Image: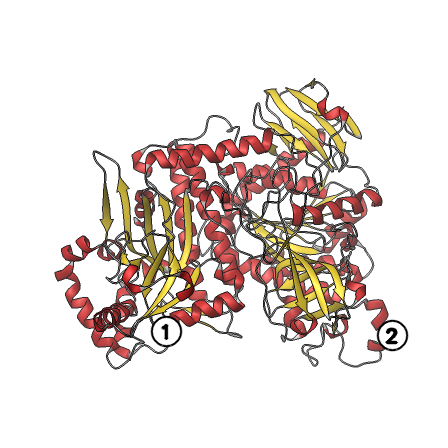
Amino acid sequence: MAGHGLDWNSLVAFDNVAAGHDGVMSDVSGSLIIKPCVAAEVEFYELSNAEHPEFAQLMPTFMGSLQRGQSKELQDHLTTAASRSAANEAIVLPAALENETEEKDAKDVAETNSALRGKKLDTGLAIVLENVLAGFQKPNFVDVKLGKRLWADDAPPAKRTKLDDVASQTTSGSLGFRIAGMKVWHPEGSGEYKVFDKFYGRNLTSDNVKDAFSAFLCVDQKTETPDMIRDIVSNIEEAVGSIEQIIANQESRMYSASLLFVYEGDPQARREALDSAVAQTAQNRDSDGLRTQEGEGIDEENDDDDEDEQVEPKLFDIKMIDFAHAEWTPGQGPDENMLVGIRSVRKVLKSLMKGISRESPPSKPVSIPILSIQQQNTAFIVPLSMSLLPGLSLSAPSTATPQPDAASHAPPRTEELPARSELRFEVASAKSYRIRLVRGTAELFGSELAPSTTYIFSGTKGAVFTWHGCTLELQGEVDSEYVGSETEAMVEWLNVHGMLETARDDAGVGRDSNGGPRVLIVGPDDSGKTSLLKCLTAWSLKMGRTPTVINMDPREGLLSIPGSLSAVTMGSMLDVEDGWGSSPVSGPTGVPVKTPLVYHFPFASPEDNTRMFKPLVTRAALAVTSRLEEDDEAKQSGIIIDTPGSVNQPKGGYDLLMHIISEFSINVVLTLGSERLYNDLLRKFASPKSSDDVVHVFRISKSGGAVARDEALMRQARQQQIKNYFFGDSRTSLNPHGQWWDFGDLTLYKAVDPSASQAQSSFLPGMDYDDESAPGQGAAPWLEKVTPSQGMVNAILSVKFCSGNSSLDHVRDSCVMGFVYVAEVDEARKKVRFLAPHPSRWGDRALVWGNWPEGVGDLVA
């Protein structure tokens, strides 16, 4: 730390902390904290930053370690503080509170020191971290200790017994987390902090732990409207969901680690943060968003930050802390002990949100959703996690932005829509089309349009439907625009929604419940399957449900790019303009972000490689089923699956379709656009073997607006999706980063065309997917390790959540961390230049180069 000009003599006591022990210090500016620690914690920070960048961004920024051996007084101070720090007491209480609880803590400290006796700690060592509280005026903060088991494998028996007793008597045992300490600012009078120590947390139960989060978020202060509080809680819950996804895809063991929540406690500062967020969202939505490509560039790895950039006020932040007993454990799977606690935190936040909603239901849709309080404005930066992480810390203009056209500046026109009619439109990628609801009510694929709010569409087809009539204000140039009156299908679709709601109510909630309806939508291509999926999802969200939506069509991208199979539990409204919304980014989003689980299927159709598609379906089904068992509300809401038309082929007895139905335990099949498919499935499920095998098959009318899509248009749409992934759209500009990698640092797999390898594999025994005599060989013909070459320029590669040395089956089944674009291959220097959505390097990860989607030649210069 010498390079930072930091020395012990310049440090001051850090008093603004929540629980734990003495010994935490700060630099004079307050931007850094120096925490006494054990060597294992420093090593974990170093390894996380070097090899696990997606997790490292959940941690406070690691600045290094500090050691001083010259001063005996400091040596003694750090020895004592480090001993206490290793004793699982998470947060440091201010000195005043320590005095108040000194007698109560004396016995615990004595027992802890006894349990640790004989284990020598590295004295005189401290870790230097960013001060997460910096930037807040009066930060509220709460330490949430995670895990039902609180002791590491090397803990002595006495300590194990003590911590097991603590867990059994607190919410650690029942929920997998407990409140270890909390400070909340109370602005009354001259203002003061109210401190909740560890005994407060130990006295909480599963029934009232929600009250702690309510106090932390100042709900009872009533300085914000119920709608606003509800949306803030929704934002925080979504952020915790992002953390859950990251940890679920890591192999680690972290005992007594914590989630540190920080929230602005000063009402005025909180109001400024909210106003800034809403103003920013309004500016993004109402502006033309028309940018040229002049001056656009790709940030290389050493891009400089603008020192004069104005810092937006912070609303909340979340970090993982306390890693004295943490380690990376390759091959042992995710840390379920931690995940139980994180999922319970999400349930408590959802319960809090519902309580606020019941007390004050909104009378009408808000014109600017409060959760346009972007991640940027809340100070929570979601790290590189699941499939879609474009734009983390990125803000450059987008090359995907529509260009100005004369029609976009023409005076707006009005359109009167009679009851039960819809405005159908098609707009090219280079054009922009604006719709504003002037009077009445209307929805786009089930999602309501907010009154007096301008929505901008580009490169899409859509239909605005009204049940009771409305007036729309329209502006821009479209390829097609007309009012359709043949909308009987919408009434039928709404009846299907009612049927599914009845099934959800009948399913009930709890461990004994079989869960809500498991719906599969099938039919030929361009029959309106995705439109039905969006409507059913949006309507169920209005009812307070949290359905899990699954996309099995690699030509489409559900919160991902084409070439993906994805699943996401929908807990918030859909985005009218984007269709589904977006996954975590650091910039503004119009609705709460979603965190999808994504698998890479690098072929255009499941029939192109059934042996790869089937195990991915099985893997996704296992992941979804496990997720539903952890969330009673999601289980009751059920699942809805979209499929490509290619799985509806009668040859082979609908083999792929039957596999999806079997793996996901489908009990409702909705068929569109094919009478033969409906009758074939009706016969197949006419005689179930048991009540558990009953599958209800329904024939659903096709929407009058469903038309065949031209392949050239589809290709253009796919390329636009890829561009938006890296550069953003007209509302959210993202700035990707260039990275040079040596050939030797990459582990690259190429998806092999099955037709090319079939001649060889057909003569080999044991190559059938269902042949258990040849385990691990099912994927072997379709993936091969290759060396980078010029042939991969302009290709899209997936970065997997597995090591490059993993088995082929593991590489195939591993979910996606993100996607990168191959901008240049220098075979002479043996280097590859990638375009990545995030500046961090991904370390030892398997890269998969597929046949789908097609390369994008004009993505970069």
Label 1 sits on what residue type? Ala
Residue 553 appears left or right of 631: right
Asked if residue 90 is positioned above or below residue 776 in the image, the reply reads above
Q: Quadrant of residue 481 in the image?
A: top right
Give residue 2's position: percent from left, percent from top.
39, 66
| Residue indicated by mark 2 | 759
Q: Which mark is residue 264?
A: none
Residue shown at 69%/51% (left/top)?
561
Crowding near pointer 1: few (<14 within 10 Å), some, many (20+)? Answer: some
Q: Which quadrant holds the N terminus?
A: bottom left
Where does the image place residue 628, in percent across and percent down from the top left?
51, 55
Residue at the extreme right of the image, as rendered? 759
Write down the residue under mark 1: 39
Residue type (three-letter) at the residue carrying disc 2: Ala
Q: Is residue 338 left or right of residue 606?
A: left
Q: Quadrant of residue 143?
A: bottom left
On the question of residue 433 being in view, the answer is yes
Q: Position of residue 317 (x, y in %)?
A: 42, 49
In the depicted view, which residue is nearer to us: 281 or 88? 281
| Residue 485 shows up from this direction | no
Mark 1–mark 2 distance (CA, rounded to whole Å): 57 Å
**Element type at marker 2?**
helix
Asked whether 121 or 572 is in front, the reply is: 121
From what the image shows, is residue 340 above or below residue 83? above
- Res 59 → quadrant: bottom left
